[in-house]
């Protein structure tokens, strides 16, 4: 399906009924030329809180800010797809065409940051789906949240694979002047054709490298996230990606092996069948070797590294690539000391 990462709707694991379209009706639509790809549907979120506390012991951040649920990028490997099932949707095509937007996110964020006693060293935007997915260009929810964060000087890390982040260089520069921001640009492959099918609505590899360069020139700490590394598909590119990112201005690098939780495995396998049938068996065999004989490994402290010979080889590639590129293994620390609630300051008793 042109412009989409998934061409199917895996059954929601929480539903008791499954809707199956009539094949004759689908054939009729095709003959009539009514088989256009589905358009993105925007749904409003009614959440009363926009900051999520993380309790996973192997994730390095404690709080995340997610302006959207679902993601138009349509990456076939996205580990966040199963989160859409909690909304009653399919983790397949629904995940990338039915986007839930938190239009009140900035106001909710302002209220939460204004609470007495709020002291959080930093947070991540976002921990689930990309804050700069294409819909952001129209809605601007991420920018509204950044405006609030810059007013409070609240430290934040942004993770994206979209060049659109360069739109907000002004706000990011303000935060950077207080050592209150860092950015990770995810680069999965340098092959534009692979990227186009694997991540159909994300920025091209070259545009992501350009984003790293512009962020670096603006004095914003930026790193590269080689994620996911898919053995047998893009693992051979890891060293080149790290080197290109360093040349563009990245100062540190990170990688995460492929994860296929829940229905993500069926979406990814379907993608392999459509676009890489000749390497499907090899890729799945290596993924199973990486994940202890399964397509996924959900245990804490194992899911982000994998195990066995494949995991060891990926670590070696990463370490070699980091050394050749001159990238740091350490992530720049953010400084929470500049945080303040904007507005008139309350006078002390003896002022």
Image: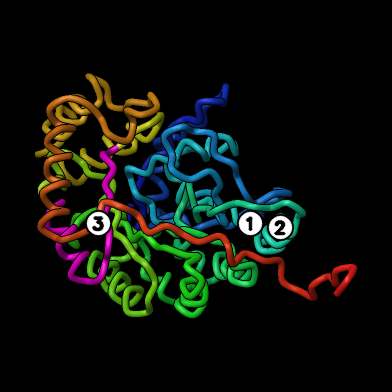
Residue hosting label 3: 328
- Marks 1/3: CA–CA distance: 35 Å
Q: Which mark is residue 102?
A: 1
Q: What element carries label 3?
A: loop
Q: Which of labels 1 and 2 is toward the front? A: 2
Q: What element carries label 1?
A: loop
Q: Which mark is residue 108?
A: 2
Q: Residue at x 51, y 38 (%)?
A: 83
Q: Where does the magenta region start and end? A: 237-258
- Marks 2/3: CA–CA distance: 36 Å
Q: Is residue 127 magenta?
A: no
Q: Residue at x 41, y 29 (%)?
A: 262
Q: Which of labels 2 and 3 is toward the front? A: 3
- In the picture as drawn, the residue positioned furthest to the right comes out as 349
Q: Is residue 245 magenta?
A: yes
Q: In this view, does 348 lie to the left or right of 6?
A: right
Q: Residue at x 40, y 75 (%)?
A: 166
Q: Do the residues labelled 1 and 2 touch (CB within 8 Å)?
A: yes
């Amino acid at each position: 399906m042109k412009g989409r990462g998934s061409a199917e709707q895996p059954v929601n694991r929480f539903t008791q009924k499954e809707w199956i379209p009539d094949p004759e009706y689908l054939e009729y639509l095709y003959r009539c030329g009514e088989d256009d790809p589905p358009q993105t549907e925007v749904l409003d979120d009614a959440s009363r809180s926009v900051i999520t506390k993380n309790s996973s012991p192997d994730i390095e951040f404690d709080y995340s800010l997610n302006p959207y649920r679902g993601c138009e990028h349509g990456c076939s490997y996205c580990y966040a797809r199963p989160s859409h099932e909690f909304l009653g949707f399919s983790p397949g095509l629904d995940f990338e065409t039915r986007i839930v937007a938190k239009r009140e996110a900035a106001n909710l964020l302002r209220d939460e940051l204004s609470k007495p006693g709020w002291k959080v060293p930093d947070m991540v935007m976002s921990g689930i789906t990309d804050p700069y997915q294409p819909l952001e260009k129209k809605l601007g929810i991420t920018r509204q949240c950044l405006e609030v964060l810059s007013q409070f000087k609240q430290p934040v890390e942004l993770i994206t694979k979209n060049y659109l982040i360069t739109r907000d260089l002004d706000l990011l520069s303000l935060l950077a002047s207080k050592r209150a921001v860092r950015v990770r640009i995810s680069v999965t492959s340098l092959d534009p054709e692979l990227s186009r099918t694997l991540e159909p609505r994300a920025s091209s590899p070259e545009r992501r490298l350009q984003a790293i360069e512009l962020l670096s020139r603006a004095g914003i700490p930026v790193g590269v996230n080689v994620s996911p590394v898919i053995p047998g598909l893009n693992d051979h590119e890891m060293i080149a990606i790290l080197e290109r990112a360093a040349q563009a201005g990245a100062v540190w690098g990170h990688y995460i092996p492929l994860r296929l939780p829940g229905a993500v495995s069926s979406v990814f396998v379907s993608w392999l069948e459509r676009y890489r049938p000749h390497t499907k068996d090899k890729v799945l065999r290596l993924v199973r070797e990486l994940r202890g004989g399964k397509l996924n490994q959900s245990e804490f402290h194992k899911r982000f590294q994998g195990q066995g010979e494949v995991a060891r080889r990926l670590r070696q590639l990463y370490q070699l690539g980091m050394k050749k590129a001159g990238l740091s293994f350490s992530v720049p620390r953010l400084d929470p000391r500049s945080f303040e609630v904007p507005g008139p300051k309350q006078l002390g008793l003896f002022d």
